Amino acid sequence: MFHNLERNKTVGRKILTTLFALLLFSLLLGSQTVFAGAQAVVETSWLAENLKKPGIKIVYVATTNQNDKAAFDGKHIPGSVYLDIPSLMGVVGSGNPPDKAGFEALMGKLGVSNSNHVIIYTGFGGHSFGAPFAAGTFWLMDYFGHNNVSILNGGMKKWADEKRETTSDPAKITPTAYKAAAPDASIFADADYVLKNIKNPKVALLDTRAHDEYTGANPLGNKRAGHIPGSVNVDYYITNLNPNETFKSVGDLKAAYESKGVTKDKEIISYCQGGIRAAHSYVVLKYLLGYPKVRNYVGSIGEWANKLDPAKYPLEK
């Protein structure tokens, strides 16, 4: 009887230990979305604790604000290197698909090595148009196999609001001989792939632009206006981000996308004007919501409406 009592106590302790471990694990998953050894989105508190950790490489991605570089030079997270929009878009839009050699040169110029955990952040994001460029950088690195990459939730705005450490000192950059992995074709779509899936019930075409661009009321300088037939409009900014530029909760994101028929059982093809806003929704769907099949049509409306045959590649309003 004594032995049975001790055995029961031991079993009880093991059960409690297991339950505690499961609870802790679930809490960690709820606060961070984990993939391939890194978090897709990290919090400012995490970066503050790991700022001087060897192997961390912090990349600031520019916004469209004309004073962005001056603002960065005046105050940024220690160790940050600056990625300007022309350099980024020169690789994203360099070919169909993006050019591997160009990507390797860009990473090497920034001092990024293959072993680095890269933390991407931007300025005020959202309507000053920083958040999608940060996501575009994330997608590009994901496409070329650099899985150890994260976006800083809330970016410089949240970091500064929390009065965390900043500096005006430029980071010392040691160029690297970066070697990209083979491109991941499963997260890329070209115009012909989109075209053959327009009427596929197992595919959802996701237009991440503003509603007036989707309807054609705002042609945004394109030769043709409107949207790809069959696509649904889920504006990346109002759907994905809170007013303070942090990502919305998983529950809110899930409800917003599912209400438009953008569901987990379908393959999602995301597009915008040039694959950048589309990349923001790519990050949300693939890494925050765990959608298994998400592609970025990088050419997007910039290609579809201006460079392709209207008879073969139609738009509707």
Image (cartoon, rainbow, N blue to C red):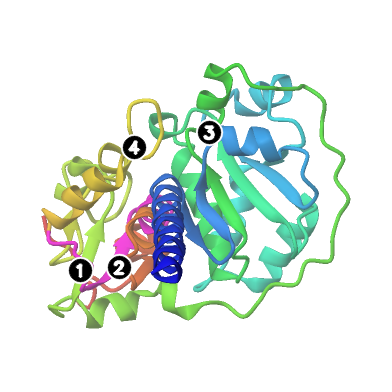
Residue annotated with mark 4: 241
Residue placed at 67% from the left, 35% from the top? 49
Which badge, 3 or 1, comes first in the chain's sequence? 3
Residue annotated with mark 3: 155
* Residue 269 disc label: 2
The span picked out in magenta is 261-283
Residue 274 in view (yes/no):
no
Give how far across and how far down residue 36 sits, in percent.
Answer: 55, 67
* Residue 204 disc label: 1
Given contact means CB atoms under 8 Å apart, are the residues at marks 2 and 3 in contact?
no
Give how far across and how far down residue 20 sits, in percent.
Answer: 43, 52
Which badge, 4 or 2, comes first in the chain's sequence? 4
Task: Decide whether residue 268 is among the magenta residues.
Answer: yes
Residue placed at 53% from the left, 34% from the top? 63
Residue placed at 69% from the left, 30% from the top? 77
Which badge, 4 or 1, comes first in the chain's sequence? 1
* Residue 79 disc label: none
Q: How crowded is mark 1: few (under 14 residues within 10 Å), some or many (20 or more)?
A: many
Residue placed at 42% from the left, 60% from the top? 9
Given contact means CB atoms under 8 Å apart, are the residues at marks 4 and 2 in contact?
no
Name the amino acid type tagged 1.
Ala
Question: Mark 4 or 1, which is nearer the eye?
Answer: 4
How far apart, in angstroms, are the residues tagged by discs 1 and 2?
6 Å
Give how far across and how far down residue 123 sits, in percent.
Answer: 54, 30
Name the amino acid type tagged 3.
Gly
Given contact means CB atoms under 8 Å apart, are the residues at marks 1 and 2 in contact?
yes
Residue 176 in view (yes/no):
yes
How far apart, in angstroms, are the residues tagged by discs 3 and 4?
12 Å
**From the viewer's perspective, is residue 275 above or below residue 193?**
above
